[in-house]
Amino acid sequence: MGFKKLFLSAGAGILAYFAWSKVKSDVLSPERALAELKNKYDHVSGSWIFAKPETAEMNGETVPVYKAGLTVMANGETVQKEVMINAMTGKVLEL
C-alpha cells in the first residue's frame, strides 16, 4: 500500500512539473523581448524593461505584457519611447 501512494505522488509531481515548465516556456524572457525590441529600432542609446509581465486588455483579450522603454536618436534629438510588448509573441502592442 505504501508503494502505491509513493508512485501516485511521484507521478502527480512529475505531471505538475511538466505542466508548469510548458506554461513557463510560453512566455518570452524579458531580456529576449527587450533584445527583439531593440533590433527593430536604429540608434538605440538606452533601454529598460520591467522583468515581471503584467496583464493588459487588448482588442477584448487579456494578454501578458512587458512594459519597456527605449531612448533613441531621431532628427538629432534624444527621444524616449514607452512601449508594451506581448510577453508571448514579442510583438509591440502600444507605442
Image (cartoon, helix red, strand yellow):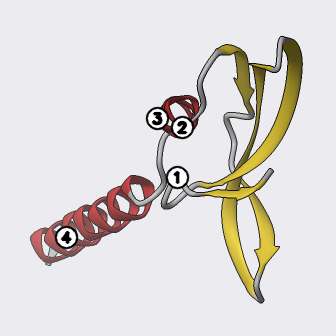
Amino acid type of the residue that numbered disc 2 sits on in the rendered structure? Lys
Task: Work out how far the residue at label 3 is from the one at label 2, CA to CA, in angstroms.
Answer: 13 Å
Residue 37 quadrant: top right
Discs 3, 2 touching: Cβ within 8 Å: no
Residue designated by label 3: 32
Looking at the image, is mark 1 or mark 4 earlier in the sequence?
4
Which residue ends up furthest to the front in the rendered image?
Answer: 75
Residue 13, position in %: x, y?
A: 30, 63
Q: Look at discs 4 and 2 and give the one toward the viewer.
A: 2
- Tag 4: Cα neighbours inside 10 Å, few (<14), some, or many (≥20)? few
Task: Say which element carries label 1.
Answer: loop
Looking at the image, is mark 4 or mark 2 earlier in the sequence?
4
Task: Say which element carries label 3.
Answer: helix
Q: Which mark is residue 11?
A: 4
Q: Look at discs 2 and 1 and give the one toward the viewer.
A: 2
Discs 1, 4 touching: Cβ within 8 Å: no
Residue designated by label 2: 40
Residue 42, position in %: x, y?
A: 59, 24
Amino acid type of the residue that numbered disc 4 sits on in the rendered structure? Gly
- Tag 1: Cα neighbours inside 10 Å, few (<14), some, or many (≥20)? many
Task: Work out how far the residue at label 2 is from the one at label 1, CA to CA, in angstroms.
Answer: 11 Å
- Tag 2: Cα neighbours inside 10 Å, few (<14), some, or many (≥20)? few
Residue 48 quadrant: top right
**51 or 21: nearer the viewer:** 51
Q: Which mark is residue 90?
A: 1
Amino acid type of the residue that numbered disc 1 sits on in the rendered structure? Gly
Residue 41, position in %: x, y?
A: 60, 31
